[in-house]
Amino acid sequence: MSRVQAESVDQKLSAVPDNFGRFGRFGGRYVPETLSAALNQLEKAYDDAIIDPEFVSELEGLFGAFVGRPTPLLFAERLTEKAGGAQIYFKREDLSHTGAHKINNTLGQALLAMRMGKKRIIAETGAGQHGVATATACARFGLECIVYMGAEDVRRQSPNVRTMKLMGAEVRPVESGSRTLRDAINEAMRDWMATVETTHYIIGSVVGPHPFPRIVRDFQSVIGRETIECCNKLFGRLPDTVVACVGGGSNAAGMFYPFVDFPDVRLVGIEAGGRSSNEGEHAAPLTYGTPGILHGSLSYVLQDLDGQTADVHSVSAGLDYPGVGPEHSYWRDSGRVDYTSVTDSAALDAFDMVAQQEGVLPALETSHALAWAVEAASEMSPEEILVVCMSGRGDKDAAEIARLRGQE
Amino acid sequence: MSHKDGKKQTGIERLENAFAVCKAEGRRAVSPFITAGDPDSETTVAILKSISTAGATCCELGVPYSDPIADGAVIQSSYTRALNAGMNLEKMFSIVSEIREACEMPLLAMASYSLIFRSGIEAFVKRGESSGLAGFVVPDLPLEESDELDEQCRRSGLALVRLVTPTTPPERAREIAKRSTGFLYCVSVAGVTGERTALPDGLIDRIKWLRKESNVPILVGFGISSADQAREVATVADGVIVGSAVVRCLEEARDVETMANAAGSFVQELVKSCQVC
């Protein structure tokens, strides 16, 4: 009996990664030797930190007083009525300090950096939310902060660039390659290669070499844990369906991870479908990609037959990335999470709908999940509960949306 | 595979021979780096022939990759130019075959593991072997992830050159040295590839220490950009690797002939500075 139990514990989907950073076949650590020592140091610092009650209580304190956690679960009443099916709830990460879930991770990693005695922080950012969250954490702790951001993203997410600078961070526009998130990660890695002994790289999603995918997932898992607690309190049960948008996949990983061992809860990740399913016109590696290596880990990726990274497109800078976190690839192949994609135009429509029906301005990234949720809810019964991870707020996108519609 | 003398040598054996010749002639090895296909295959072949004639011991052929995180601006731009000009793996392997026919100089492919993995490890190594590569340098593949490629390289007799860096702890450096075949690549600085004006402090001592731990030749690279620096490193190492400085010297040349000549003269100068007795 006890043996059977032990086996079933081992087989839990949540029992990943292993010591090599493997989520099934995915993950790992494909980096230049220069970074190996720093990643080992980080792994050790993290293992020590999470069993140190002082670290845990400091982070919990910050989550409460600085971030404003727990974030509420909002019943989207008019949207539910409009969809005419399942009850739609928003997990309000957009109400977090700095306006998105990203702050959960940057605070945790900034504390880790200080444990390792590193006072210089670098980060990459796409939509700018991770850059803002990193700048914010660094300001809070008095750390030097440099944020790499693709020049194209600097243009389309200018409100966040201003915020980062106001927080005392230096923003370095990246002009190489496609001038978006992927190039920002390359540049941050290059910086780290040269400064690794004094600098910590706060990666912004569940991507990159081991142990980053695990660390970021764990810091973001507060989203799913709070959702479970809140659902139990409000409904006396878990939700039927939980949906989140997936770029690198940190809000989705944080939301899904606490749910993966509850097989009755349907989990759905929404990628950026862009303009079409043609190569270069979307950013949906789990939908259209193949397993490959990008930015230090093995995961689904959009690349050509030689292994060159493909161009990608999304109206949303935060989803405009050819790779995805390795744990999502694991969940995809194990069948635990369903992944699909939503186009630019459907996301823009959902943005309008949620703004006008609910008085909540969602981030363009989040709007992808919302578009799917409204569709899906209409095919579900009114007894069913659908939770959308409202990963971030859309103030940063207002100007870009106006520009796209020629309403500057 | 077969060559003029009809003898079938493995990639590792060809590298061993090349180093033995160097040693016999009282020289340290010089291994330049150039990008395959920058600006095109024809020029790359001409440059390789020229640096072989100039006395290069072996050469690293950079396989252009879209996201080279270990490379600085010079090599990154070179990769981008090559990819924009239509370089791909098929053309890269054709360059290798052509050089295998024409020169003795062993060629190593400097390739991201992303590219190797995408082709399939066994398939990629076999393709390397049949085109006449002597081995691989894989800058983004640490020890822990390298078993499969290591196994395939051993089967094909190709070298898997491993890298140690200033951040590698001693016991790990020992293990890397033990598992490196062909030669050991000692990275001079923590950072990306690129020219630097001075050799880092402690480098000479580090090389001396590694020399005792390694059974294969030690070549030092990253940041070595002048004949003077090469001369200094050559006092303790078995050779030098010069990358960005070669690529930059090619940027300034315009046509095939001047590029080949420029690379040839630069390599000749390096070879001269690595004459130790």
Image (spheres, coloured by chain):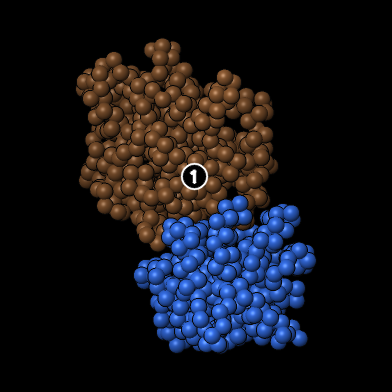
Chain colours: A brown, B blue
B153 over B18 or under it: above or below: above
The chain to which mark 1 is attached is A
Residue at 46 percent across and 42 percent down: it is A325
Residue nearest the observer in this picture, B79 or A332: A332
Q: State the quadrant of the N terminus of chain A.
A: top right
Residue B221, picture quadrant: bottom right
Q: Nearer the viewer, residue A183 or A47?
A: A47
Residue B230 against residue A231 in the figure, above or below? below
Indicate the position of residue A133 as horizontal and vertical percent values: 49, 37
Look at 26% across and 25% down and name the residue there: A377
Where does residue B36 sit, x and y in percent of width and height? 46, 73
Up the image or down, A359 lies above or below B81; here it is above
The quarter of the picture where residue B242 lies is bottom right
The x and y percentages for residue A342 are 28, 39
**Residue B33 appearing in the image:** no
Where disc 1 sits, the SS reads loop
The quadrant the C terminus of chain A occupies is top left
Of residues A125 and A221, the one nearer the viewer is A221
